[in-house]
């Protein structure tokens, strides 16, 4: 039998690898790449450097719709010194460097726009220290949530756990995102970074916070100006974080839950309830989940997810209470339930048994593991393979009408009727921050990456929904400024549409130019022209 | 041309929906998150753990399939290494399928087959087993007559000559390695003690073809399968027991496409007999040991409970579980025919599994696969570890005979 | 300073808001002021600060800002320049009960805000050892708060600061959205706004911000337990914080409490001290009645196990009342004329080492250990402990003053050797800490400084000499 791999293409011997989009590049020139490759091999060891296309291709795409681009070289540094060596060599030969955490950002952040060296940090995977009594862990970039959460549980603590893949890097997630169901009580990524060690693009090592002078982890920023979050939303343009101390949080020995639910499609009511519970600040974990999200969260597989989604009421509050005794956890749950019953008589409270039934056959997420599931586990499970995440922040009160408008805008584009999208097409969840002072809204659209028509449909729908939200004053949750620099129209428009951004952007641009004189660390725009050579976002 | 079985084959391109829908979520690189209690044991993909590049994980191989199909890349040396250091342990598929409904393991298997079809499989590195297979009918080069030597004087029936209910399909490993011979003998004794009417093909049994199947050489595999089927049909037996999960997998998945046979793994038969109380393990076996799930039996065919039913029925036996057990079980290093060409890497994996057994304080590792047993014994010998390796049947036999 | 400059500034800010001469400045200094050439400016609007600063930038005039009630003479050595005091910007722009926030200018004091919030059934967290009565200043400077135990976030989300050029730095989500929308702390790119925290305003002067407020709960109860030894007391504080039962928690010795609770009357100190055991652990519980009862019971049980005696009566009332307002560091001056402190963070298990080190230094400089005020406040559920030791002395007595200074300096030196985390170093301590930090740390500060203040006119030398 003959190969059926793209027979016609193969016969014409067209092998097209999508990289090097620059004409006459100053960076990543082939003669330099060759030299860099051999020096890198010498520095890191032959085994940990490769330019084989079969290795490179694993880093050319992610689940986003960003077009594929291959790095020229992939490196697996094993230590901070290795990372320094990579920058040294990259500076010498003018080669771009792209740090890679897990490549899970849903927007193609780790796809190297012009190739160069991709620095996969997962070989640096030590938990250097974990201290349950003083509640911190010092970790390397290859440490993921699965690992750290298991380690934290053993010392009576937990890590702020996003509902992304369990294998997501903790450092990279804290540098980008960290939206978690404990954010109402404990905060989000920035609140949990105690200090970092980073290699600046010049190869210089920066340590911040207590690590800057070998002090104990004081759980407060300093000394003086707080530099520890400098790399958050820096997208690797300012250097590579090689160690981070993350805060751990106390894990109470006892838990309790209640399951407030509301069948009517009125998000505003649920948002109000969410707000009330957030301000009461008794829950360990708190979020609003639409039925489809519930399905995704507690079904073992897609079939079960659909089953759960069908059976669950439209809107639900996820609540988990903790206590030093069962009495304490129960009391917190009881008080919250009473409060909700008084204010929202129309709510149902699902009996535990119902959930028990629902999850009875689940192998991994049965009810016994319910609490463990939310606090220990993160996972990715979407109904149709691929999806677009809308990540927005605003006050809960402002979000309500907007969500409806977004769904309408989206439906007009991608739906067939004017009804809001069915839950297996789109789903929303709300996640309060800091006792409900602000909240995160995730708005997901599911799609099939392999189906181009579906993809375009979803992309446009997503765009319209997001534009609607932004026109209502909502902020994008992913601090995108550092990567917008150089996008021609946006560059021009910024002073007009976002005057408050000017100083910040200007400082960022100058910072970048000083810290990375050769523009090698995630090069996105050119220093001389200020423009992107290729629109990368 | 030699005779072959003729079953439908899939080709890689048919799995386009799988490899192009891989969401790069990387769940396939770890154990099931809810079941990870110990951070030391979160990893579960042997090749990814050792070689670390994305390509060595299932997600990377999905990408290789996609890029080959898009003709973005062509095969290179590294690709061969990537493809042939995969243990085909299926941990990736077990993580991915329930949530994403994708089949990374299948994609990898078909990639190997594609490598054969397209003529770039590293066949030269397997020349030894090809020679052996050619000469002796098994990949280890043991003469056919020697295959039945273990059964001498045990009163085991010759299935071709005598009538029996079951055929005991011994597989390639048990009869070819002196260290495994006591184990197959114990298996035969246990079956006899249990009153199972069985016979063997003896020197007429050729390789199940599992090794060829795993490396992607379907054509040659089908030749061997055809030969065995011919003999099975000659013996006129419909029910087959095999103690070898590798044989079990190909017999059950492939042979049955061409022949009307029922295939059982030894543990299924024994567990059934114990449940029905046909046999009652009565002797105490004071042992604190852990059970290793062979990938082909456990993850591939879901036989997690049967071996445990047997072990739990034995008085005095304390069953410890690996931190990575059942669906999360780590490959022993013997999967995917990798040990033929990358023995050092294979042994590295075995050592990790032995470390895990020591970590939980097991005195012995019990399993029910000759390759697992061999890998463990060799590595233990090399490292001088104080840990024993038993076949499931050996432990049961001790109890049945009341041996302490 | 040149009269023309003063006139120009007066034109911007209005005559009544610009002052010259040592007398005008003396309120910022406890010591007699050596001659100074600073012009005091008290702008009333953002435009006035911005225009004043821009004017100074164009004319290369250094700009200093008032950072606390008092400045140490010497940190502003008779420099030429202007000194900006934002006390006149005292508008509370908005109180948002729904989102537990107050939108305030830098001149808003704890007292002002407390009063306004009470009407809306809200409150704020107070500093343990505050140096300023400006709420925004205190929060952006990250002063340790009573209540940092179980309320873990920084207490502000957004701030606006004026840069050396007169341009505005806006932090967090307001970089892209209108006020009243997200008002979320995070910058829209690399997090550079946190650089402004505890920076001695070398990058810019924060003048407006959104601070966090808290609802007044159904029930509040304050309890205290006294102990003879630090270890048991510290164990109780750790346990209660770690279990998240309390809203506020602290542990202080008799000297600290007697000074803090004597209402500024020296004659009361000795009497108050007599009523106290050596260590007192204090907790407040806030929430629904049933929960407060439960937490109170659990704490009582834990205290009993550790040998703590419940503090009741007047003393408890005093503590309860004291927790309703900020505690200012300068309020401790009354006792002996002046108070100096050593403060920073250590793990709970090492607290006693911290105090023994300080006591050793104090003893070698002639201070008795029972004369040192000590307070410990857990940070983040007991993840670490804020430790402060106060040395009370008579500033008129040169020898004593020298000894106090020496005690503080030597204590820091040896504590820092042992990993004591000094989060907000100032003056000599800053020099010491920054000489120990990794060089890139200071380099990064310098780079950012050179970007936002290329002429180096904003609070020069205030954080690190030469920056
Ligand atoms: C299905 C799904 C659900 C998700 N749900 C959530 C959720 O609930 N909550 C949440 O917080 N997130 C969620 N995410 C987002 C995702 O988990 C984050 O984007 C992710 O953790 C960051 O990606 P990463 O860890 O793979 O880092 P990468 O994508 O590898 O890197 C992110 C960026 O940081 C840079 N970078 C990485 N490592 C370093 C380093 N060491 N030093 C400097 N720069 C570095 C990279 O260059 C890149 O620009 C979800 C994602 C998916 C796919
Ligand atoms: S193979 Fe499956 S589990 Fe692995 S990354 Fe792809 S979609 Fe995820
Ligand atoms: S089959 Fe096993 S070794 Fe191969 S990719 Fe999957 S998990 Fe890794």
Image (cartoon, coloured by chain):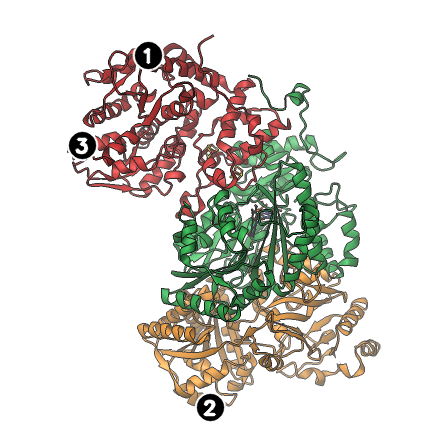
**Above-or-below relation of C308 to B311:** below
Check contact, mark 3 vs mark 1: CB within 8 A: no
Mark 3 crowd level (few <14, some 14–19, many ≥20, 10 Å Cα): many
Are marks 3 and 1 in one subunit?
Answer: yes
Q: Secondary structure at mark 1?
A: helix
Subunit that carries the residue with mark 3: B
Residue at horizontal 63%, vertical 61%? A400
Residue at horizontal 51%, vertical 50%? A310
Are marks 3 and 2 in one subunit?
Answer: no
Residue on which the image places disc 2: C268
* Colour of the chain lettered A: green
Q: Is residue C302 left or right of residue B222?
A: left
- What is the distance, in whole Å, between disc 3 and disc 2 at their CAs? 88 Å
Residue C334 or residue B242, whichever sits in front = B242
- What is the distance, in whole Å, between disc 3 and disc 1 at their CAs? 34 Å
Labels in figure, total: 3
Q: Nearer the viewer, mark 3 or mark 1?
A: 1
Residue at horizontal 33%, vertical 12%? B234
Q: Which mark is residue B400?
A: 3
Instruction: Provide the letter of the chain coloured orange.
Output: C
Task: Locate residue B99, reporting x and y percent.
Answer: 50, 42
Subunit that carries the residue with mark 2: C
Can residue A520 be seen in this snapshot? no
Subunit that carries the residue with mark 1: B
**Above-or-below relation of A161 to C318:** above
Mark 1 crowd level (few <14, some 14–19, many ≥20, 10 Å Cα): few
Residue on which the image places disc 1: B234
Are marks 2 and 1 in one subunit?
Answer: no
Q: Secondary structure at mark 2?
A: helix
Q: Earlier in the sequence, mark 3 or mark 1?
A: 1
* Colour of the chain lettered B: red
């Amino acid at each position: 039998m003959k190969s059926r791999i793209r027979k016609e293409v193969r016969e014409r011997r067209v092998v097209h690898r999508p990289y090097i989009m620059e004409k006459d590049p100053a960076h990543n020139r082939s003669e330099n790449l060759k030299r860099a490759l051999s020096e890198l091999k010498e520095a890191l060891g032959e085994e940990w450097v490769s330019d084989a296309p079969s290795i490179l291709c694993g880093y050319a795409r992610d689940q986003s719709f960003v077009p594929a681009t291959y790095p020229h070289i992939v490196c697996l540094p094993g230590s901070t010194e290795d990372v320094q060596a990579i920058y040294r060599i990259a500076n010498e030969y003018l080669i771009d460097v792209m740090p890679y955490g897990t490549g899970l950002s849903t927007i193609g952040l780790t796809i190297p726009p012009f190739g160069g060296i991709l620095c996969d940090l997962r070989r640096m995977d030590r938990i250097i220290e974990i201290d349950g009594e003083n509640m911190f862990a010092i970790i390397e970039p290859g440490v993921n949530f699965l690992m750290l959460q298991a380690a934290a549980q053993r010392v009576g603590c937990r890590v702020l756990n996003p509902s992304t893949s369990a294998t997501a890097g903790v450092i990279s997630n804290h540098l980008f995102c960290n939206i978690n169901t404990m954010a109402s009580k404990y905060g989000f990524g920035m609140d949990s970074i105690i200090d970092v060690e980073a290699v600046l693009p010049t190869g210089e090592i920066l340590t911040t916070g207590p690590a800057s002078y070998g002090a104990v982890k004081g759980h407060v920023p300093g000394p003086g100006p707080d530099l520890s979050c400098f790399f958050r939303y820096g997208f690797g343009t300012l250097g590579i974080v090689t160690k981070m101390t993350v805060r751990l949080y106390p894990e109470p020995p006892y838990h309790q839950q209640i399951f407030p639910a509301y069948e009517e499609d009125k998000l505003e009511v649920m948002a109000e309830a969410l707000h009330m519970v957030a301000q009461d600040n008794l829950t360990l974990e708190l979020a609003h989940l639409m039925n489809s999200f519930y399905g995704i969260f507690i079904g073992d597989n897609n079939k079960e997810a659909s089953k759960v989604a069908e059976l669950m009421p439209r809107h639900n509050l996820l609540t988990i209470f903790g206590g030093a005794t069962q009495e304490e956890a129960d009391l917190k749950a009881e008080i919250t339930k009473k409060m909700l019953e008084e204010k929202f008589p129309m709510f149902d409270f699902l009996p535990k048994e119902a959930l028990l039934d629902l999850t009875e056959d689940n192998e991994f997420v049965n009810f016994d593991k319910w609490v463990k599931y939310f606090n220990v586990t993160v996972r990715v499970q979407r109904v149709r393979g691929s999806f677009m995440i809308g990540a927005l922040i605003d006050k809960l009160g402002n979000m309500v009408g907007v969500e409806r408008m977004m769904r309408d805008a989206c439906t007009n584009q991608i739906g067939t009727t004017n009804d809001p999208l069915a839950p297996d097409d789109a789903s929303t969840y709300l996640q309060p921050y800091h006792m409900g002072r602000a909240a995160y809204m995730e708005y997901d659209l599911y799609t099939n990456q392999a189906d181009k028509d579906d993809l375009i449909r979803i992309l446009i729908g997503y765009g319209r929904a997001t534009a609607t939200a932004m026109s209502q004053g909502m902020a994008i949750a992913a601090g995108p400024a550092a990567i917008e620099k150089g996008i021609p129209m946006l560059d021009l428009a910024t002073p007009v549409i976002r005057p408050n951004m000017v100083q910040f952007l200007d400082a960022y641009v100058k910072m970048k130019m000083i810290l990375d004189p050769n523009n090698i660390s995630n090069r996105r725009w050119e220093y001389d022209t200020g423009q992107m050579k290729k629109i990368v976002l | 041309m030699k005779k072959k079985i003729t079953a439908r084959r899939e080709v890689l391109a048919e799995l386009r929906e799988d490899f192009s829908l891989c969401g790069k979520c990387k769940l396939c690189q770890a154990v099931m998150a809810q079941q990870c209690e110990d951070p030391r044991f979160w990893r579960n993909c042997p090749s990814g753990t050792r070689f670390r590049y994305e390509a060595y994980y299932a997600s990377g191989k999905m990408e290789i399939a996609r890029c080959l199909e898009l003709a973005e890349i062509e095969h290179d040396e590294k690709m061969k290494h990537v493809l042939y250091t995969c243990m085909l342990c299926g941990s990736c598929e077990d993580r991915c399928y329930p949530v994403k409904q994708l089949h990374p393991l299948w994609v990898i298997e078909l990639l190997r087959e594609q490598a054969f079809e397209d003529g770039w499989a590293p066949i030269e590195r397997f020349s030894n087993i090809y020679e052996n297979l050619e000469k002796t009918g098994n990949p280890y080069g043991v003469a056919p007559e020697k295959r039945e030597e273990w059964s001498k004087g045990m009163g085991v029936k010759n299935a071709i000559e005598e009538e029996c209910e079951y055929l005991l399909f011994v597989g390639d490993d048990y009869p070819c390695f002196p260290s495994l011979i006591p184990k197959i003998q114990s298996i035969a004794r246990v079956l006899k003690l249990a009153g199972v009417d069985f016979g063997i093909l003896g020197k007429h049994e050729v390789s199940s073809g599992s090794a060829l199947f795993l490396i992607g050489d379907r054509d040659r595999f089908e030749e061997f399968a055809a030969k065995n089927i011919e003999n099975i049909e000659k013996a006129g037996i419909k029910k087959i027991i095999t103690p070898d999960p590798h044989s079990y997998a190909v017999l059950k998945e492939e042979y049955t496409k061409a022949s009307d046979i029922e295939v059982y793994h030894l543990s299924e038969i024994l567990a059934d007999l114990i449940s029905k109380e046909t046999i009652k393990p009565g002797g105490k076996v004071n042992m604190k040991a852990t059970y290793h799930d062979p990938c082909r039996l456990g993850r591939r065919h879901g036989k997690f409970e049967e071996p445990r039913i047997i072990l739990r029925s034995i008085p005095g036996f304390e069953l410890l579980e690996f931190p990575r057990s059942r669906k999360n079980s780590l490959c022993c290093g013997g999967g995917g025919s990798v040990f033929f060409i990358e023995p050092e890497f294979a042994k590295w994996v075995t050592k990790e599994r032995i470390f895990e057994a020591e970590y939980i304080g097991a005195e012995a590792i019990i399993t029910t696969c000759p390759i697992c047993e061999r890998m463990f014994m060799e590595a233990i010998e090399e490292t001088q570890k104080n840990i024993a390796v038993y076949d499931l049947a050996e432990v049961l036999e001790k109890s049945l005979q009341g041996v302490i | 300073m040149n009269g023309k400059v003063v006139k120009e500034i007066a034109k911007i800010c209005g005559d009544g808001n610009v002052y010259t001469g040592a007398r005008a400045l003396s309120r910022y200094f406890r010591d007699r002021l050596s001659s100074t050439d600073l012009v005091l400016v008290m702008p009333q609007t953002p435009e006035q600060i911005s225009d004043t600063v821009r004017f100074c930038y164009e004319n290369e005039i250094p700009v200093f800002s008032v950072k606390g009630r008092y400045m140490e003479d010497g940190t502003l050595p008779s420099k030429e320049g202007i000194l900006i005091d934002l006390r006149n910007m005292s508008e509370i722009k908005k109180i948002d009960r729904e989102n537990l926030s107050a939108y305030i200018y830098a001149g808003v004091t704890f007292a002002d805000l407390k009063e306004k919030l009470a009407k809306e059934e809200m409150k704020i967290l107070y500093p343990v050892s505050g140096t300023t009565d400006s709420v925004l200043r205190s929060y952006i400077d990250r002063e340790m708060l009573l209540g940092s135990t179980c309320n873990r976030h920084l207490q502000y989300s957004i701030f606006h600061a004026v840069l050396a050029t007169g341009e505005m730095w806006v932090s967090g989500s307001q970089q892209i959205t209108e006020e009243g929308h997200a008002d979320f702390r995070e910058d829209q790119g690399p997090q550079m706004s946190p650089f402004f925290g505890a920076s001695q305003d070398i990058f810019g002067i924060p003048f407006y911000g959104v601070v966090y407020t808290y609802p007044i709960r159904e029930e509040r109860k304050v309890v205290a337990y006294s102990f003879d030894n630090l270890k048991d007391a510290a164990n109780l504080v750790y346990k209660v914080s770690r279990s998240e039962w309390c809203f506020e928690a602290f542990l202080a010795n008799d000297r600290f409490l007697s000074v803090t609770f004597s209402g500024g009357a020296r004659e009361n100190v000795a009497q108050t001290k007599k009523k106290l055991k050596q260590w007192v652990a204090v907790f407040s519980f806030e929430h629904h009645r049933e929960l407060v009862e439960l937490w109170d019971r659990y704490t009582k049980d834990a205290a009993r196990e550790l040998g703590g005696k419940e503090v009741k009566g007047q003393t408890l009332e005093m503590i309860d009342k004291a927790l309703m307002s900020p505690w200012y560091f300068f309020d401790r001056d009354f006792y002996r004329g002046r108070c100096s402190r050593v403060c920073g963070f250590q793990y709970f298990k090492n607290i006693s080492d911290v105090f023994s080190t300080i006591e050793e230094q104090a003893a070698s400089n002639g201070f008795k250990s029972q004369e040192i005020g000590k307070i410990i406040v857990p940070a983040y559920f007991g993840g670490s402990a804020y430790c402060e030791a106060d040395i009370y002395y008579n500033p008129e007595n040169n020898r004593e003053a020298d000894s106090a200074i020496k005690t503080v300096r030597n204590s820091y030196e040896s504590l820092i050797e042992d990993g004591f985390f000094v989060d907000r170093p100032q003056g000599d301590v800053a020099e010491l800490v920054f000489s120990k930090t990794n060089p890139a740390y200071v380099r990064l500060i310098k780079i950012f400084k050179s970007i936002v203040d290329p002429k180096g006119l904003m609070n020069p030398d205030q954080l690190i000499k030469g920056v």
